[in-house]
């Protein structure tokens, strides 16, 4: 049988939460630091992706789509710098901007996929475009509620799918050469 005096020797979950309650300010500050660090990392990755897209535009001049690719890269770079300016406010604004950018990027990639020669792996570029377009639509449909968590998740998915599409295209072009 356990008496009340026996349980006082072992800290309970309730007393642990009570101790944390006294430190709530530090916990909130830690959360803010994590948010800022996450948005800075996200901004840096968007800038890297945008610069890479712009460099890719210069490499693909022969496609006649240089301006479209360069514009997509500039959009990513702008979004990255917006994140650095004010990371906390940027969460809501950047979520909407990301949703609209993904919709535009998906639409452009879809257009480019269907304008590619049928012998190339256009289907992978088209799949990447459809996924990007759907991600953009999901963001816009749930905005602003999803502003806290969606940026890193969806941007990561978008970059993975875009990367997979370009890797597939690159390997296909290598096999032909």
Image (spheres, rainbow, N blue to C red):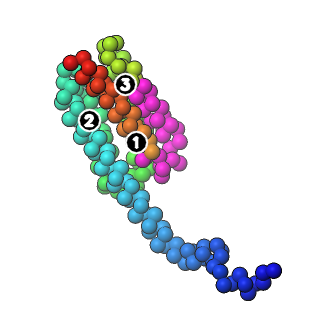
* Element class at badge 2: helix
Can residue 158 be seen? yes
Q: Which mark is residue 53?
A: 2
Magenta stretch: includes residue 171: no
Q: Which mark is residue 155?
A: 1
Q: Earlier in the sequence, mark 3 or mark 1?
A: 3
Q: Residue at x 41, y 61 (%)?
A: 34
| 18 to 160, vertically: above or below | below
Q: Earlier in the sequence, mark 1 or mark 2?
A: 2
Which quarter of the picture shows residue 52? top left
Residue 107, position in %: x, y? 39, 26
Residue under label 3, please give it: 125
Q: Earlier in the sequence, mark 2 or mark 3?
A: 2
Q: Residue at x 64, y 73 (%)?
A: 13
Side (left or right) of 52 relative to 127: left
Q: Residue at x 36, y 32 (%)?
A: 164
For the record, the magenta segment spans 127-152
């Amino acid at each position: 049988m356990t008496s009340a005096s026996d349980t006082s020797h072992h800290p309970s979950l309730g007393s642990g939460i009570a101790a944390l309650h006294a430190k709530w300010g530090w916990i909130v500050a830690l959360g803010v630091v994590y948010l800022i660090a996450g948005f800075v990392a996200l901004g840096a990755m968007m800038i890297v992706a945008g610069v890479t897209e712009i460099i890719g535009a210069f490499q693909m001049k022969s496609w006649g789509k240089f301006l479209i690719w360069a514009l997509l890269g500039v959009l990513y770079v702008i979004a990255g710098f917006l994140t650095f300016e004010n990371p906390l406010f940027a969460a809501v604004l950047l979520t909407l901007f990301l949703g609209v950018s993904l919709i535009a990027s998906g639409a452009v990639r879809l257009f480019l996929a269907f304008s590619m020669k049928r012998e190339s792996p256009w289907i992978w570029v088209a799949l990447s475009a459809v996924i990007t377009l759907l991600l953009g639509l999901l963001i816009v449909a749930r905005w602003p509620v999803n502003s806290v968590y969606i940026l890193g998740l969806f941007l990561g998915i978008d970059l993975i799918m875009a990367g997979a599409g370009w890797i597939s295209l690159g390997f296909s072009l290598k096999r032909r050469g």
